[in-house]
Image (tube, helix red, strand yellow):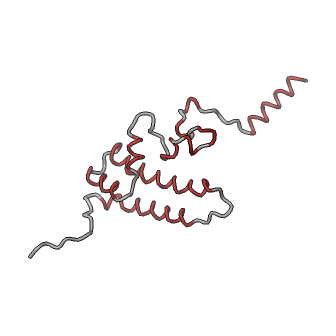
Amino acid sequence: MPKVKTNRVKIPEGWELIEPTLRELQAKMREAENDPHDGKRKCETLWPIFKIAHQKSRYIFDLYYRRKEISKELYEFCLDQGYADRNLIAKWKKPGYERLCCLRCMQPRDHNFQTTCVCRVPKNLREEKVGLADFAIANDSDISNRA
């Protein structure tokens, strides 16, 4: 008698260790997709979705490349089943793209003034934000110097 072929994909060994975290992130993704977006700009409604997609991909990337806790078979299974973004992980492996938050960040046409996202700017080249307290202190010292 011939073997019966099923449509189920064989789950690799070690899946039970990462499944709870991935299920939790999927539940968060569903919540983010179903959140009401009244009064928000189009890009603001997508931010939580991009954030959760980044978390899922980074989780699998770290388990395989940094901590080496999962097998190549399980890593490929996660990519094939859509638990992580294969293209985003491919960019993370290249030098200079380690902190990339999503693939949209690389495309200047998606940003104002044809620039890129802040995740693409090295820390030493970022402008420091001046807080209100710093501004008030600076103004007080200017006033005392004038008197």
- Judge left or right: residue 110 versus residue 135: left
Q: Nearer the viewer, residue 137 or 68?
A: 68
Q: Nearer the viewer, residue 37 or 12?
A: 37
Q: For residue 136, which quarter of the picture?
A: top right
Residue lying at 38% horizontally and 39% vertically, measured from the top left: 93
x, y percentage for residue 1? 8, 76
- Judge left or right: residue 13 versus residue 46: left
x, y percentage for residue 113? 63, 39
Q: Farthest residue in the left direction? A: 1
Q: Farthest residue in the front direction? A: 109
Residue lying at 39% horizontally and 36% vertically, measured from the top left: 94
Residue lying at 30% horizontally and 60% vertically, measured from the top left: 15
x, y percentage for residue 70? 30, 51
- Judge left or right: residue 31 versus residue 127: left
Q: Nearer the viewer, residue 50 or 24?
A: 50
Vertical placement of 85 versus 23: above or below?
Answer: above
- The image quadrant where one finds the C terminus is top right
Vertical placement of 2 versus 77: above or below?
Answer: below
Residue lying at 59% horizontally and 58% vertically, measured from the top left: 45
Count of marks overlaid on the render:
0
Q: Farthest residue in the bottom direction? A: 1
